[in-house]
Amino acid sequence: MKPFYLVALLIVTAISVQAQENPCPTVTGIRKTNVVNNGDGTCTGTISMNILNDVSNSNPKSVRVEVLAGSSATPVVDQCFLASTVLGGASYTTNPFTIACGSTITVRVTRHTASNGVCQGGTCGNTIIIQESPLPVVFASFTARRSGAVVLLNWQTSSEQNNSGFAVERYTNGNWQEIGYVASQAQAGNSDAILNYNFTDPNTIKGISQYRVRQVDLDGRSKASDIRIVRGEGVLGKTVVYPNPGLDGKVNVIFEDAGTARDVTVVDMTGKVVKQWRGVTSNNLQVENLPAGIYSLRIIAVETGEQSAEKFVINRH
């Protein structure tokens, strides 16, 4: 009988070892990350999560992550990861994807027993499916314009979800400071209609001022809008280029009015066109990647044909 017990023991041990060599990875903390509103109704973002190989060994298992938007059955992301063998697991982030800002995101995670890193073969455990809500607020527009000793801020939303309101912030002395708060007009923080907001900031600063609107959820989370820039009080001219001279190959350009379409061209001292934009409607533009030299910024209003020019310098590093 002893040989029988020995064989049985070996079988049980083999089953136990096989179970340890084929653990089902643990996946936790699935969430949206790096969300950016592109300003054209689309948003770019990633999905992050923590993945752990249940038994820390040299044979990590594969995890397939699919991201779907709205009702589409075609994933915008389909990636395979090898689960971490590090105690506590490691954070994994998908490739960026771009979808309509109002789309609900479905994340589907399938865990595999194979260790080939290509997410093939048998699966283990249940498929994990979660839904992430759309971006809390979709900004349709945001402008900042000086009118004498005040700056007028106006923004429009096309969709709001779980929105408490907006903290208006100005960049002062190297820091963003809240200068006011505007409550959401959406009933219970939710709306699919166009909503308009405004804020007036008494501002006699002679230099450049920067503004942004920070959207605040009902649960306290927040996301900032794009930045808008206005000229200082009393600064004449329809266009401001700063800093001038520019450093690191870049300067910022502020136009008088947002919404007016302009064709903008940067020309070097030989007359060669080095940068060009068509139909610029925002009130600010960043010019980058310029070598040291003297340049002319030429602006043409598309509707009226009115032309203007500003000279600026890029210093050597």
Image (tube, grey):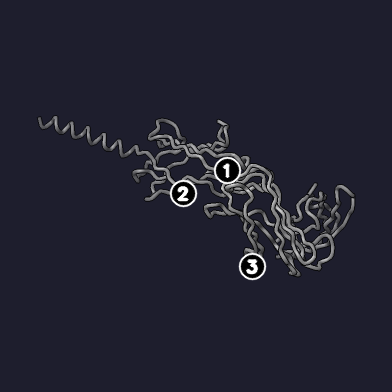
Q: Report, in whole angstroms, how far the alpha carbon at label 1 lies from the one at label 2.
A: 22 Å
Which element is circle 3 on?
loop
Say which label, 1 or 3, has the lower sequence index. 1
Mark 1–mark 3 distance (CA, rounded to whole Å): 32 Å
Q: Nearer the viewer, mark 1 or mark 2?
A: 1
Q: Nearer the viewer, residue 17 or 53?
A: 53
Q: Is residue 287 visible?
A: no
Residue at the left extreme, as displayed: 1
- Disc assigned to residue 134: 1
Which one is in front, 189 or 206? 189
Amino acid, disc 2: Ser
Tell which circle, 1 or 2, labels the residue nearer the N-terminal end: 2
Image side of residue 9 versus residue 299, left or right: left
Q: Position of residue 40 (x, y in %)?
A: 69, 44
In the rendered image of this protein, does residue 287 appear above or below residue 63?
A: below
Question: Residue 187, position in %: x, y?
Answer: 60, 47
Which residue is tagged 3?
174
Label 1's element?
loop
Q: Position of residue 271 (x, y in %)?
A: 86, 55
Task: Give the mark nearer the N terminus: 2 vs 3.
Answer: 2
Camera-nearest label, 2 or 3: 3
Nearer-the-camera pick, 50 or 296: 50
**SS for callout 2:** strand
Q: Residues within 10 Å of mark 1 (few under 14, many from 20)?
A: many
In the image, what residue occupies the spot 44% across and 41% down? Answer: 82
Instruction: Report the label total.
Output: 3
Residue position for label 2: 91
Q: Farthest residue to the front: give it.
A: 187
Asked where in the image residue 21 lies, by quadrant, the reply is top left
